[in-house]
Image (spheres, helix red, strand yellow):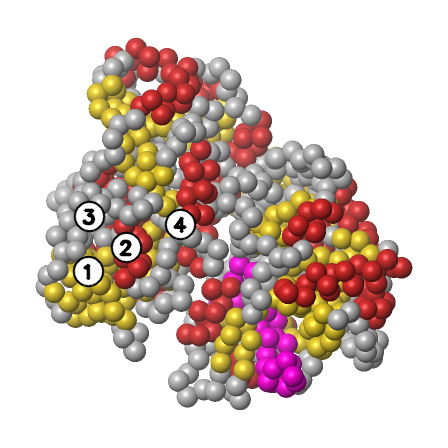
């Protein structure tokens, strides 16, 4: 065994083999895979091995397309062919019109990735799969490239190619320890000896937290028992002139595919069961859980009703094995939070089908720092301190029970809630708040008109439309109060804090005490990495001279990792997270200054406290830090309050607001208002796939200021010209907003992709942001939006249709 290598990948299933292979494809040959037993001896060997193109986001569709193309190439390798039934076709069934509407959206989204789905009616479903009944079925989504593959052959083929490129694979080599050194390199201890490396990758399947514990981390991954059986031969299949398509059924919670001349039928029963919560037997290798068909009888009955042939055929064999889940069902692929030179590719519940793409994106991140797609949807840092195995198990059960039922917009499933709250959560609940979840935090979405109010799930404007309009009206005409919890807040101290931020940001960083600025951080490719507010606080009894770095709640781990990675050893820069210590109360509207002045001493006039100012004060007797910034487009203040004093500050503001018609508003109103102002959301509109010029942020780029991260790459990009442009669109539709991912068309050609959409209540427009071809980015350009199967006219308009001169924000 080598004593030194560049990368050690731990785990020999599809995740590890794919990562190893793709590292060699990216040009790194000095890489090693270590497997405790034989390749594919964990979850991979008993996978049902379905390979679909379907994904909930464009990133997921893209990585699955890569998997399909890779697997097809491997299958056709004359030296080592892989048994791959490519292009069998598959149908996701639908029993409701809302599900069909969703399928139309996913077809629109996939079109932007050059993937062709087809929405078909029930009769066409039955024509393409003659074994199914159309009872209680409306239609389905057809994936022409759906298929299945041999798991063991696939992994061996990937390992074989990696070896040919210079990689090495060590089987029967259990890892016993991991040690990180001061230079951030690692030593991997094994029963066969130690191996030093620059980078470690955890690809250890259901043993993920055994390996995680060796490096002092805890991964939010839990396992579920999953059963399928293989039937005896079915005459109708034997006599058919083609393979039967795959079926995935949200009505009866089962799937099936052809296996020889029978069927492989898998179940997602409601009475499901977690596995390995108290650890995994070291001898659980190439092993299964005990059969338990009684647990799936209700699902089996539904499957038989959908597919009567199942009631007439015997069971050949039963498989019950563990599969891994994360909190939201998507895997964890990327940097391990809080660790240097450590990555993971774990929680792959559908590992075989999409593992080729996951390894591809991870290898790009390891070698180049970023992947070709924005990978936030699978980034391990999207979960923070609330993420543990216990919470994951609750969400895994919920996801398992709803395996083929996708999330609708604004759908908030109940398991694992509330994970994070503030002292105001029960207070707002008593006021009638409905809550959404942001990085685990319970955040008010809107005020319910009655306790039993539940809006209809779907892709159209729902019963909250008038509620949100009323909240926006209160903010526009009087004053509104909104809790924004979980907002990422990093305190930066030290003599070099401004020089450090100047190097991190592509624009001007304010340095004068009491001033606030907005800035953007780029990656080394010149694309957008982060968005941040910088607030300069002078030395006082509350702390030394410091900068508050504020960013989206979801970015808590992401931004801290990025900043810490770039502090030079000789710099006097210190970072401290305040994210979980303080909460923001946003006070917005033309009467906001009057409300603030009524409960906080000092001069709050426009002259004394203009827009983009920051000041420490007391709200009543609660200590607070007030920033003159706005995400609503109205005069507004961000009031940052320690959580211990939050309720006191809230009461003081509510009391002061009584004379000014102060009302509560929630996240849906915020989203509507920010759309009208041209304000962007991180990881919705601000993506690592695009640079600030393409995103319309020219104002925030100052290449003449000197060097900053990504500057040279950005200048090269600017010289080459934009690939896409972010634009604001006005839609000719009143029934539904544009869902993220929807395709924009001219004729049959895709010319852009929606990133955000909502109704602008103050301007009376259906608005969307989208990245479009540069030739269509000028005002007045016309195109069509594929809005859940309907073609809707879309016109490019000027950004910030509400108060474009910002006079209302300035007060």
Q: Would residue 612 be found to the left or right of residue 378 on screen? A: right
Give the image location of residue 605, x and y in percent. Answer: 84, 76
Q: Would residue 521 be found to the left or right of residue 777 on screen? A: left
- Circle number at residue 230: none
Give the residue at x 30% y 52%.
208
Residue that lies at the very extreme toward the right in this rendered image? 659
Find out whether residue 545 is within the magenta segment: yes
Q: Give how far apart the Cα atoms at labels 3 and 2 are.
A: 10 Å
Q: Give how far apart the Cα atoms at labels 1 and 3 are.
A: 12 Å
Which secondary structure lies at badge 4? helix
Name which of mark 4 and mark 2 comes first in the sequence: 2
643 is higher (above) or lower (below) than 135: below
Q: Give how far apart the Cα atoms at labels 2 and 1 are.
A: 10 Å
197 is higher (above) or lower (below) than 282: below
**Whether residue 295 can be seen here:** yes
Residue identifier under label 3: 282
* Mark 1 burial class by Cα count in 10 Å: few <14, some 14-19, many 20+: some
Name the residue nearer the viewer: 544 or 527: 544
Give the image location of residue 385, x and y in percent. Answer: 47, 59
- Circle number at residue 176: 1
How many numbered markers are drawn? 4
Which secondary structure lies at badge 2? helix
**Whether residue 744 can be seen here:** no
Give the residue at x 26% y 46%.
280
- Circle number at residue 389: 4
Image quadrant in which you'd find residue 368: bottom left
Magenta-highlighted residues? 527-555
* Mark 4 burial class by Cα count in 10 Å: few <14, some 14-19, many 20+: many
């Amino acid at each position: 065994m080598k004593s030194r290598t560049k990368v050690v990948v731990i785990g020999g299933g599809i995740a590890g083999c794919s990562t190893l292979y793709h590292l060699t494809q990216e040009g790194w040959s000095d890489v090693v895979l270590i497997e405790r037993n034989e390749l594919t001896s964990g979850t991979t060997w008993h996978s049902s091995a379905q390979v679909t193109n379907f994904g909930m986001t464009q990133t997921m569709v893209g990585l699955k397309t890569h998997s399909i193309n890779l697997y097809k190439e491997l299958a056709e390798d004359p030296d080592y062919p892989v048994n791959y039934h490519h292009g069998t076709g598959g149908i996701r069934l639908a029993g409701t019109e809302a599900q069909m509407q969703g399928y139309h959206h996913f077809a629109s989204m996939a079109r932007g990735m050059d993937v062709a789905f087809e929405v078909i009616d029930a009769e066409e479903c039955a024509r393409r799969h003659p074994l199914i009944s159309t009872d209680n079925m409306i239609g389905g989504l057809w994936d022409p490239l759906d298929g299945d593959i041999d798991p063991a052959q696939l992994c061996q083929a990937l390992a074989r190619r990696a070896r040919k490129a210079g990689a090495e694979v060590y089987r029967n080599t259990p890892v016993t320890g991991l040690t990180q050194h001061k230079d951030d390199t690692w030593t991997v201890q094994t029963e066969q000896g130690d191996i030093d490396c620059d980078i470690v990758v955890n690809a250890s399947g259901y043993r993920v937290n055994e390996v995680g514990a060796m490096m002092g981390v805890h991964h939010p991954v839990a396992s579920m028992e999953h059963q399928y059986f293989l039937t005896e031969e079915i005459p109708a299949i034997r006599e058919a002139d083609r393979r039967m398509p795959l079926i995935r059924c949200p009505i009866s919670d089962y799937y099936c595919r052809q296996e020889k001349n029978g069927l492989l039928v898998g179940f997602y029963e409601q009475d499901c069961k977690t596995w390995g919560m108290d650890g995994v037997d070291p001898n659980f290798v190439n092993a299964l859980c005990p059969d338990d068909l009684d647990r799936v009888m209700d699902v089996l009955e539904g499957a038989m009703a959908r597919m009567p042939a199942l009631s007439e055929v015997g069971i050949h064999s039963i498989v019950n094995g563990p599969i891994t889940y994360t909190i939201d069902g998507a895997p964890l692929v990327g940097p391990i939070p809080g660790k240097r030179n450590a990555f993971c590719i774990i929680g792959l519940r559908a590992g075989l089908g999409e593992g080729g793409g996951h390894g591809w994106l991870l290898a790009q991140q390891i070698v180049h720092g970023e992947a070709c797609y924005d990978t936030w949807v699978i980034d391990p840092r999207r979960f923070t301190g609330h993420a543990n195995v216990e919470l994951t198990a609750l969400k895994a059960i919920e996801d398992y029970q709803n395996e083929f039922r996708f999330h609708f917009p604004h759908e908030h499933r109940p398991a694992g809630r509330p994970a994070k709250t503030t002292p105001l959560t029960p207070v707002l609940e008593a006021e009638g708040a409905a809550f959404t979840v942001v990085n685990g935090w319970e955040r008010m979405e809107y005020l319910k008109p009655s306790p039993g109010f539940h809006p209809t799930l779907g892709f159209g404007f729902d019963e909250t439309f008038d509620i949100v309009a009323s909240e926006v009206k209160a903010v526009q005409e009087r004053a509104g109060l909104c809790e924004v919890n979980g907002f990422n807040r990093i305190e930066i101290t030290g003599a070099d804090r401004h020089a450090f931020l100047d190097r991190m940001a592509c624009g001007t960083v304010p340095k004068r005490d009491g001033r606030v600025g907005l800035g953007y951080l780029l990656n080394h490719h010149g694309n957008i990495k982060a968005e941040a507010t910088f607030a300069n606080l002078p030395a006082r009894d509350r702390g030394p001279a410091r900068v508050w770095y504020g960013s989206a709640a979801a970015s808590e781990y992401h931004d801290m990792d990025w900043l810490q990675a770039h502090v030079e050893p000789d710099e006097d820069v210190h970072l401290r997270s305040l994210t979980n210590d303080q909460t923001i109360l946003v006070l917005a509207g033309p009467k906001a200054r009057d409300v603030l002045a009524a409960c906080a001493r000092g001069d709050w006039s426009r002259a004394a406290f203009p827009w983009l100012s920051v000041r420490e004060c007391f709200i009543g007797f609660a200590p607070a830090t007030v920033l003159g910034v706005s995400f609503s487009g109205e005069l507004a203040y961000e009031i940052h309050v320690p959580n211990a004093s939050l309720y006191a500050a809230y009461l003081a503001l509510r009391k002061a607001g009584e004379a000014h018609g102060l009302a509560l508003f929630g996240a849906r109103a915020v989203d509507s208002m920010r759309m009208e102002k041209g304000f962007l959301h991180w990881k919705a509109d601000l993506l690592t796939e695009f640079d600030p010029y393409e995103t319309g942020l020219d104002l925030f780029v100052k290449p003449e200021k000197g060097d900053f991260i990504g500057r040279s790459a950005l200048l090269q990009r600017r010289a080459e010209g934009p690939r896409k442009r972010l634009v604001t669109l006005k839609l000719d539709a009143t029934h539904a907003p544009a869902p993220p991912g929807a395709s924009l068309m001219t004729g049959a050609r895709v010319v852009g992709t929606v990133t955000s959409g909502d109704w602008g209540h103050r301007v009376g427009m259906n608005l969307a942001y989208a990245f479009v071809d540069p030739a269509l980015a000028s005002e007045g350009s016309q195109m069509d939006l594929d809005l859940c199967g309907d073609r809707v006219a879309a016109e490019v308009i000027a950004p910030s249709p509400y108060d474009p001169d910002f006079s209302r924000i300035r007060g």
